[in-house]
Amino acid sequence: MRTVRQVARAAGISVRTLHHYDAIGLLKPGHIGINGYRYYGREELLRLQQILFYRELGVPLAGIAAVLDDPAFDPLAALREHRAVLESRIGHYRTLIRTIDRTIASLEKDEDMNDNDYYTGVAPETRDRWQREAEEFWGKDAVAAAQAKARTFNKEQVAAIQAEMEAIRADFQRLFREGADPASDAVQAVTGRHYRWVSHSWTPDAAAFRGLGRYYVENPEFRGTYNDDELPGCPEFIAAAMAVYADRSL
Amino acid sequence: MRTVRQVARAAGISVRTLHHYDAIGLLKPGHIGINGYRYYGREELLRLQQILFYRELGVPLAGIAAVLDDPAFDPLAALREHRAVLESRIGHYRTLIRTIDRTIASLEKDEDMNDNDYYTGVAPETRDRWQREAEEFWGKDAVAAAQAKARTFNKEQVAAIQAEMEAIRADFQRLFREGADPASDAVQAVTGRHYRWVSHSWTPDAAAFRGLGRYYVENPEFRGTYNDDELPGCPEFIAAAMAVYADRSL
DNA sequence: ATCGGGGATCACGCAGCGTCAGGGTCAAGG
DNA sequence: CCTTGACCCTGACGCTGCGTGATCCCCGAT
């Protein structure tokens, strides 16, 4: 029969944790003295080992209680499920890291950037041509307004915007390769990010956002940028997603 | 000037989130009507884009506020630091997944296991010899008590214990390869896990735990199991760590 | 005037404890 | 016997990032 402190030291946890486990019914002391002291016996220590084992696997305490208290519980299925959760978390973190790397690269490269330019890395004449095309498509006023707005960003902001666009593009391409439905939640979520991205320098309504989608399809420059040559149909896929988004969310 | 709902829809977040950001001072409305309504202008929308961008990178809200509000803030350093955090989280998850995989493998293999045996995969005669040696080392009573305790585990429990031991061994070997100090926090943390592992079937005091360390050094069987042949000195390293742990924590 | 669709402000809930605060208990030494 | 000092207890708030009501006010359209 050990006291909380003894158990805590042996198990490498805190006294508070034992109190907590008692409070939530995960691990109750074997006996409680007349003074109210908690005393733990061998049985409780063994259970604690199990608890700590699963805890080290990242299983939530409620789940641990389920595993240990339900004799009919299938630990194999539970572990596999938990494994899948961990895998997806890793995937998520990796995506974040990639985005961060791109952002860092942009920041390092553009440390001496002297004007705010979304199209860093694009030749000036190409950029001018894009501008003319954009003006024909949406009108001079809209383009000028967008550019004015864009000039209010500082260089970290511009770098962040670029990196985010890269990430969005990668997501679109991945979803397209996977054969996702443009109207599916996953694709629409990315489309929402894209809408937010566009909103950096522009605040399109539904019709304008659909128009942007068409622009992606029709403009060969964008076709080249927005999809690999190995992904024919990707711009159409994105345009379809944008049309759905415009209908549903704008 | 848009209302909460309009902003929320455009940004793909909830109204509650805007309330929250207002409450914590991360994003305040540009104007507040006499009726108390929140109205957001272009400036606030731009700031919201930044916020959502960093949020998608997994940066905590307090950190985002720091980035956006401190003009002297170094976004490059912040991103690198955050990147490191994410990397370590991935490493942690990978370790967990490896442990889970081992556990799953054990469970699948031992689905038809009919008796509780820690030494699954070890020939019976070897096991018997280990038992005799253990009896010589600690005495028959102690060994019998440990075995009795071991028999109270069911097969998932046994599998979990095995998997955990594999993980612990891997950690010890890694730390040894890295030239870690047996008294360092990292090594002591693993030693604590090892102590807890041992406690599955036994509850050694300081002297007994030190003795177990010596056993690992002296017993050729354990030397072979506990370290690769490429890691001479690893058992001594573990024994040293166990001695320190016994002094400090038991 | 009414009604539907917002808007607002509390305020609890969740996960897993950390961290006081305020107050008994126990074993050992003066 | 009394005093330490080390431990024990029970609240209860804090942290993260909102979700989810509950309750009440407001605005434009019919």
Image (cartoon, coloured by chain):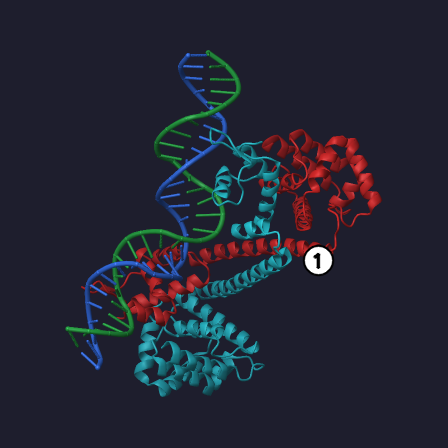
Chain colours: A cyan, B red, C green, D blue
Q: How many marks?
A: 1
Q: Amino acid at mark 1?
A: Glu
Q: Position of residue A175 (x, y in %)?
A: 53, 75
Q: Position of residue A60 (x, y in %)?
A: 53, 52
Q: Which residue is mark 1?
A: B108
Quadrant of the image for the N terminus of chain B? bottom left
Q: Residue at x 47, y 58 (%)?
A: B79
Q: Of all residues shown, which one is farthest toward the right? A: B125
Q: Is residue A199 above or below residue A34?
A: below
- Label 1 resides on the chain identified as B
- Quadrant in the rendering for residue B67: bottom left
Quadrant of the image for the C terminus of chain B? top right
Q: Residue at x 38, y 70 (%)?
A: A116
Q: Determine whether, in the image, residue B182 is placed left or right of residue B1.
A: right
Q: Which of these two is toward me, A185 or A119?
A: A185
Q: Dot 1: few (<14), some (14–19), or many (≥20) neighbours within 10 Å?
A: few
Q: Position of residue A184 (x, y in %)?
A: 48, 76
